[in-house]
Image (cartoon, rainbow, N blue to C red):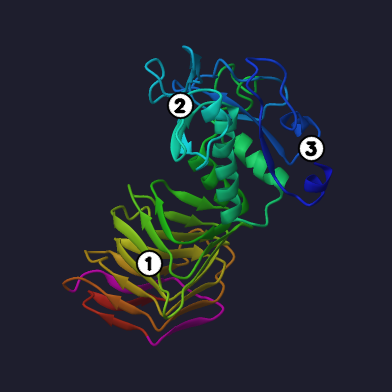
Amino acid sequence: MIYANTYGVPIVAGAGNGSGSPVYYPAAYSSTYSNVIAVSATDHNDQIASYSNAGPQVNVAAPGGWGSYYDGSYRYNGPLNQGQNIFSTTPNYPFLYQTYYGIDVDTTYGYLGGTSMATPHVNGVAALILSLNPNLTAADVRTIIEQTADDKGTPGRDDYYGYGRVNCYRALRYTLEHYGGTLSGNVVLREHLTIPSSVTLNISPGTNLQLQNDAALTIYGTLNAQGTASQRIVIDGQNLSGWTTPMIFVLQAGGASIAYADLKNAKYQLVARTSGSISVDNCSFTNFGGSGNVAVEVDQNEGVPNGMGNAAITNNAITGTAKSGYGIYLWNVVPASLNVTGNSIQDCYAAIESHV
């Protein structure tokens, strides 16, 4: 335990199935080591499971299932608890829970209940957090999981649920908004994501980012979206409608560097009102058409009291709809360096409108 704590390795452990008796070790080490997360279990009704241990060492709860009952054999998926435990993989050879406890558990998949079934849920959340930001410490991971759990039982922390039942979505969002991280693969955002100052959001080459339900990215820190010629980034606004919520909104001292990305399906696709620097290179902008709509806007008219940094909008392909909307809109911009070159702009009301 000391070795794992020294090297920042998170340890997630079940509190035990003693029906309220003290938290078992190694979970009980959570009060001594900040890398240990002690997990109690909730049942199919999202209430503390009757078998779960409790105590001051419990950090969070997670789904562990109904548990078992005895009718000559211990039942994990019998008539009284059918479908109310955790369905999971099992060993492909006879093992204790099959040979000793009953006939419910197969050697492929099966239902089981207990804090040992609750613990993997928290393990998975911890792994996903670290996949977003591998630079986090084990203590950071525990804090994130605690701070984003859904409060259950007595308001605030209690000995049964700890800080609450684990919430994976909230944990990942909190990670990005407080510590930054990297998006990769296929990503769906259904709520606004705000990146504060001093925090960086990276988007990996080949990422497909879908913004649903009018979700958008607001950047006060740094956006670094660097695709490649062979692995372009896709950012799809899913017909984001409001002009007050651009798909990507860079504000105050925020900065953005976007390359080899395809932005589409939003009325306002990239709006920068920032004293930071903006670089947009080898990107495409499509399906933003409509009166007053904009693919790229750099605006120093409001919210930029200290002047703007460098702005480079280069080598992009911008395609409007039925000669409506603006390709590039520059408003009151006096940047330290303005480079708008090599862009192909077509089918817009105005390719470039400048009020510099």
Q: Which mark is residue 85?
A: 2
Residue 151 makes an appearance in the image: no
Instruction: Identify which amino acid the numbered label 2 is placed on.
Output: Asn
Q: Where does label 3 land, which residue?
A: 33
Residue 46, image x, y percentages: 47, 23
Q: Dot 3: what SS?
A: loop
Q: Which mark is residue 150?
A: none
* Spatial CA span between label 3 and label 2: 31 Å
The residue sitting at 45% across, 25% down in the picture is: 103
Task: From the image, tell me which residue sits under label 1.
Answer: 234
Residue that appears at 29% across and 71% down: 326
Give, as a single range, the part of the protein colored magenta.
323-342
Type of the residue with mark 3: Tyr
Quick check: 175 above or below 288? above
In primary-sequence order, the first of circles 1 and 2 is 2
Q: Foreground: 204 or 82?
A: 82
Q: Is residue 318 left or right of residue 43?
A: left
